[in-house]
Amino acid sequence: MRDVNGSVRWFNGALLVCVILLSGCSLFSKKTGNEPMELVDFDATVKVKKVWQRNVGAGQGEGFTRLTPAIDGDAIYSVDRKGRVTALNRLTGKKLWQRKTKESTSGGIGVESGMLFIGNQGGELIALSTTDGSEIWRRQLSGEILSVPRSNGDVVAVQTMNGRLYALNAKTGDELWFYENSPPVLILRGTPSPIVTDNAIYAGFSNGRLMSFNPVNGLILWEQRIAIPQGRSELERMIDIHASPILREGILYAAAYQGRVTALARGTGSAIWAQDASTSEDIALSDNLLFLSQADGKVTAYNAASGEVLWTNEQMLRRGLNGPQAFGDYVAVVDFKGYLHVMRQTDGEFVARARVDRKGARATMLTDGSILYVYGNRGKLIAYEAVEKK
C-alpha cells in the first residue's frame, strides 16, 4: 500500500511490526529456532493481586494501535478502537461516565486541564471534556494519528504517520504551527508521543532524530541523532524513534529501534550517556533505574545517571514484549500471549506471573507508584498490586 507520495507506508510497517511483535504470524507455526522462548518455572515470592477489573469496550482491535489510558487525579480514562471513552475511579474501578463517540480511534488518550485528547484514523484530533466526555472541538490534520496527544494546558502537540508534528491551541484547536520531517521509505507503524512543557516540545522521528521546538512558534531549539542508519537494505537501515521520550529533572531519556538508548540534557540536547540498544516500546524510569524491553525480548535495566547496564533478563526472548512499567519494588512486562511477568527491580529475577489477556496488551501500562494498570487488547482494564507471600 502506498501513500499519495508513492512511499511504502502501512503495509510494510504493519508487516514489520508483525515480525517484531510475533503477534501470531505464521512464521512461528513451525520449529525454526526463531520461535518464542518457552517460559521457565520459578518459585513465586510475590502474589499479583487483582484490585479491580472492568470491561471498557472493544479494546485495541485487530490493527497495531496502542490506545494507552491516562491517569488524572483519582480518575483513569480509556478509549477503545470504536471510540468508546470511559472514565473510572482508578482506586475502585467504579464507572464515572462513558461516552460512545463512534470514532475509529487510533491514537490516545491524553489528558490535561480538564480536557481529553484522542485521534482518529481519518487524522482528526478531538478534544473532549473530562467531566462527561462531551466534545469541545475537533481539528482535521494531514495524517493518521497513532500516538497519544500531549498538552501543557495551552498547547497540544501530536505527531502523524506522515512525519508531521502539529502544535494546536489546546482550548480552541486552532493550528499554531507544524513541522514536517519526511519519513524514510520503510518505517514502523506508529509514532512516539511528544513531551510538551511551557518552554519546549520534544519529539522523536522515524529518521532517528530527537528534536526540541519552541512551543509558541515552532522554532527549532536543537536536534540530536539517537541512531544512524546501518546496513544495505531498507530493513537494516530502519532507526525509528518509536518509544516516547521521558523527561525527568532536566534530563531527557530516549531510545530508537536499531539505534541507542540515551540520556540528554534538555536545554542543549547534548548526550550525557548512550548505549547501543533496539526497541519499539516505551521505556520506564524508577528512581535511578531505567528499564527497556529490547526488540529481541531482553529486558535491560540501566543506571539512569551513568548508563551502566545493571542487569539483563534473557528468559523472554522473541516473546513480543510491551514496554516495561515499574511499580513498587518491581518492574513488569506483558508478552504476546498475555502473560504479565513481574521482576525485581534490583536484579531482574522473576517474582510473579499472571495471565491478563490471551490476546496480549500492546498499550503502555500505567502506575501510580504502587498499583499497576494494564489495558488488555480485548478491552479489559485491570488494576493490580504486588503483595509479598508470607
Image: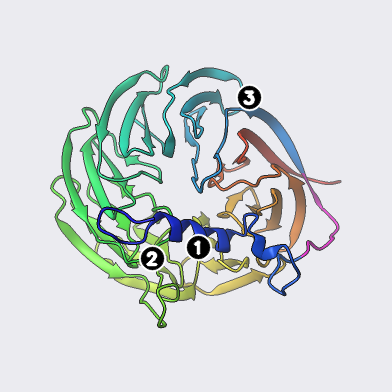
Residue highlighted by disc 2: 186
- Front residue of 10/78: it is 10
Q: Is residue 75 above or below residue 212?
A: above
SS for dot 1: helix
Q: Is residue 334 above or below residue 76?
A: below
Q: Horizontal placement of 288 versus 43: left or right?
A: left
Per the picture, the main secondary structure of the magenta-coloured stretch is loop
Residue in the picture at 14% in, 55% down:
219
Q: Bin the neighbour count of mark 2 within 10 Å (Cα to Cα): few under 14, some 14-19, many 20 and up.
A: many
Residue in the picture at 60% in, 41% down:
377
Would you identify the image quadrant in which residue 134 lies? top left
Q: Horizontal placement of 140 versus 37: left or right?
A: left
Residue in the picture at 34% in, 44% down:
144
Q: Position of residue 94 (x, y in %)?
A: 61, 20
Residue highlighted by disc 1: 16
Would you identify the image quadrant in which residue 351 lies? bottom right
Quarter of the figure with the N terminus: bottom left
Residue highlighted by disc 3: 92
The magenta region covers: 38-47
Inspect this view and state whether residue 346 appears: no
Q: Horizontal placement of 190 versus 195: left or right?
A: right
The three-letter code of the residue at mark 2 reads Leu
Q: Horizontal placement of 172 versus 143: left or right?
A: left
Q: Are marks 1 and 2 in contact (CB under 8 Å)?
A: yes
